[in-house]
Image: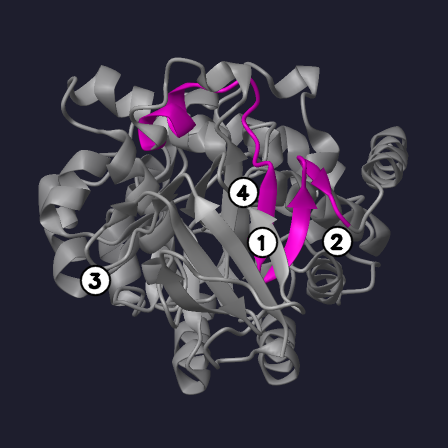
Amino acid sequence: MSRLLIKDVRYLVTMDEDRRELKDHSILIEDGIITRVETDIEPESDWEVIDAAHMWVFPGLINTHHHFYQALTRCLGEVQEAELFPWLKTLYPIWARLTPAGVRAGTRVALAELIKSGCTTASDHHYVFPRGQDPHLIDQQIEAAGELGVRFHPCRGSMSRGEDEGGLPPREVVQKEEEILEDSRRLIEKYHDPRPYSMCQIVLAPCSPFSVTPELLKETAVLARQYGVRCHTHLAETADEDDYCQKELGMRPLEFMEKMGWTGPDVWYAHGIHFQDEELEVLARTGTGVAHCPVSNQKLSSGVARIPEMLELGVPVGLAVDGSASNDASNMLLEMKSALLLHKLYYGIDAMDARKVLEMATRGGARLLGRPELGSIAPGQAADLFLVDARRVGFAGAQSDPVTALLTCGDALQADLTIIGGRVVVREGKLTEFDEEEINREAVAQSRAMLEKG
């Protein structure tokens, strides 16, 4: 049995059932599970010990929506002033050149950035499967995530409705419905591990109402529930989407998704900006969740999601960085800061506080993914957590409230240590087992190759 003791934590934010915040406590981890949170735990000779007397400790953050491959197309000048639909129309032809090696490179970059920012569980929505390439792209992601040691919820995305059928994507990235469903079934049977503490759980995730057929949405929901896996898609992200759905489908996006069988506690949407009052009630009543992506929503000028109202109604809400090309960073600490400031500005000074944001990024994300063993530090929980050094100059004068300091202060928005399943994957702000320069070189080469093909 492996044992890791995080000893004498200066300030421990547990996010447990009582939301306790403790001083001078220690955390014992045995075989990847937290077994004790107490004062005065004395280590035995064969235990690994981390002295945390100068550390603040938080539960691992949970990223509930991303597009890893987009790390290869960040900061492209031609889309910096584009809203979602023209942004997609410009980038689809570039993404149509994506290769398996590119998917792997983008995954490694995104996950490396995430775990350096305290993220321990990540969901990725991959929906681009270019014609002529090996279609087993999700396998590349799962392999890379396994190497990096991240808990991973790969979302098998899909696009089945191309431009010639009234959809948005070009034919080069559209697949046949039977091909999508067959690969979805294959991935579940090969990789999905429903057990507590598992490292990989498959999600089925048609891209959006404007890129898939109604038949695919219905059949995907049936398949997901047959296997007991979750469903995810984009919804209510822009006013353009609302207009499209009413013109092409004769109803608003959420009404359409309800008719397709896409509401319930096993479903969560990315964004959820343009919901009306009665639609928020539907989300709350059905337990349908929302992944909040504040940085992407601001960068693409998509709008401000009604998160304070959702939380008040009891809608499940998690936090997410969204795709790198609509955010340009895979940093959960930055995302938390943005969420805090955005809702204070838009809804009022008391509409959001640091602890509400941290709850979204931990327990909220665990709820969306159906992972009650994640999102808090308590006996029986997975040993996923991160530590920051309170002695950093950026935290000077901010010792009285480490939670608020985490979101608003600091000289670098990253963790000093990140631990996943009891395994230290980041130490002193650096990956412990991987060469960050090599990850960068691989991604730069794949990005150049994809951009130069045009």
Identify residue for label 1.
419
- Residue at image point 51% right, 66% down: 29
- Residue at image point 34% right, 45% down: 13
- Identity of the amino acid at label 4? Leu
Between the residue at mark 4 and the residue at mark 2, the CA separation in whole angstroms equals 15 Å
Estimate the x, y position of residue 269 in percent, counting from the top left: 36, 52
- Identity of the amino acid at label 3? Gly
Mark 3 or mark 4: whose residue is earlier in sequence: 4
Which portion, as a residue range, is magenta? 403-432
Between the residue at mark 1 and the residue at mark 4, the CA separation in whole angstroms equals 41 Å
Of residues 234 and 46, the one nearer the viewer is: 46
Q: Which mark is residue 287?
A: 3
Mark 2 or mark 3: whose residue is earlier in sequence: 2
Q: Mark 3 vs mark 4: give the one in front.
A: 3
Q: Is residue 274 left or right of residue 433?
A: left
Mark 1 or mark 4: whose residue is earlier in sequence: 4
Is residue 128 visible in this depiction of the protein? yes
Q: Quadrant of residue 246?
A: top left
Q: Mark 4 vs mark 2: give the one in front.
A: 2
Crowding near pointer 2: few (<14 within 10 Å), some, many (20+)?
Answer: many
- Identity of the amino acid at label 2? Pro
Identify residue for label 4.
168
State the SS at label 4.
loop
Crowding near pointer 1: few (<14 within 10 Å), some, many (20+)?
Answer: many
Mark 4 or mark 2: whose residue is earlier in sequence: 2
Identify residue for label 2.
130
